Image (tube, rainbow, N blue to C red):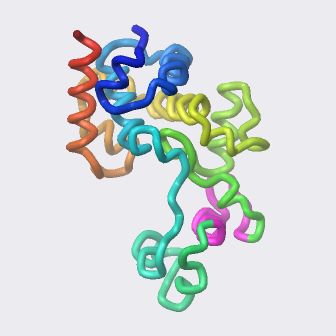
Amino acid sequence: MNVTAQHLHGIGVAAIWVEPINTTLVAFGINNADEIAAFIAQTAHESGRYTKLEEGLNYSAESLVRVWPSHFNASNAAQYAHQPERIANRAYASRDGNRDEASGDGYRFRGRGAIQLTGHDNYWHCGQTIKIDLVATPDLVSTPMYAMLSAGWFWKTHKCNLLADNEDWVALTKRINGGTIGLEDRVGLTQKMLSILNN
């Protein structure tokens, strides 16, 4: 099943996404209407209908303490506030294959794509699968084709098709988001996309 510009127009997504989506559906075996509708709905929600392909890291001191309490506190948050590069380098240091804060890996491998690909190891593994060196060229993940292929890689490695086939939208959202943030929009988008695909 191919997705068309008309299908995407129905949920407010630009035609530029047709080729990246169809390439990804084939590459990662996202085949039936439930799987396709859920994949598009979840990735569209995660990325603001594919308009935000890079993690927003412009946090205030208060937000840093709330979002990353293990990295930021009352004594250091003000030194990092509203400095996305420094924030990422601290928050993502020494995890997911990233080196220490001074290495710059946190910002280099910050969240990008239609489902935020984050951390050196995820960039490496995804790149191996799609045969592109994403460690050397991480900014590619902010472009439509690789934003979508990296989301497809996440989808397959996290066995999301199974949850879509079972129409378990809550479990699917938790697998992608870690919680149920935006559940209503995700489910609504999935149902709308299903209706569009089935007509």
Residue at the (55%, 18%) spot, across then down: 23
- Front-most of 122 and 140? 140
Please state the horizontal and vertical placement of residue 161, each as a whole percent of the image.
38, 24
Q: Is residue 93 left or right of residue 48?
A: right
Residue at the (48%, 47%) spot, across then down: 52
Question: From which residue to which does the magenta span run?
Answer: 85-101
Please state the horizontal and vertical placement of residue 93, each as a whole percent of the image.
65, 65
- Front-most of 199 and 138? 199
| Screen quadrant of the N terminus | top left
Relative to 127, is 177 above or below? below
Q: Quadrant of residue 95?
A: bottom right
Please state the horizontal and vertical placement of residue 106, each as a whole percent of the image.
66, 60
Q: Any magenta on residue 94? A: yes
Residue at the (28%, 48%) spot, across then down: 182
| Screen quadrant of the C terminus | top left
- Front-most of 138 and 180? 138
Please state the horizontal and vertical placement of residue 149, each as a whole percent of the image.
57, 29
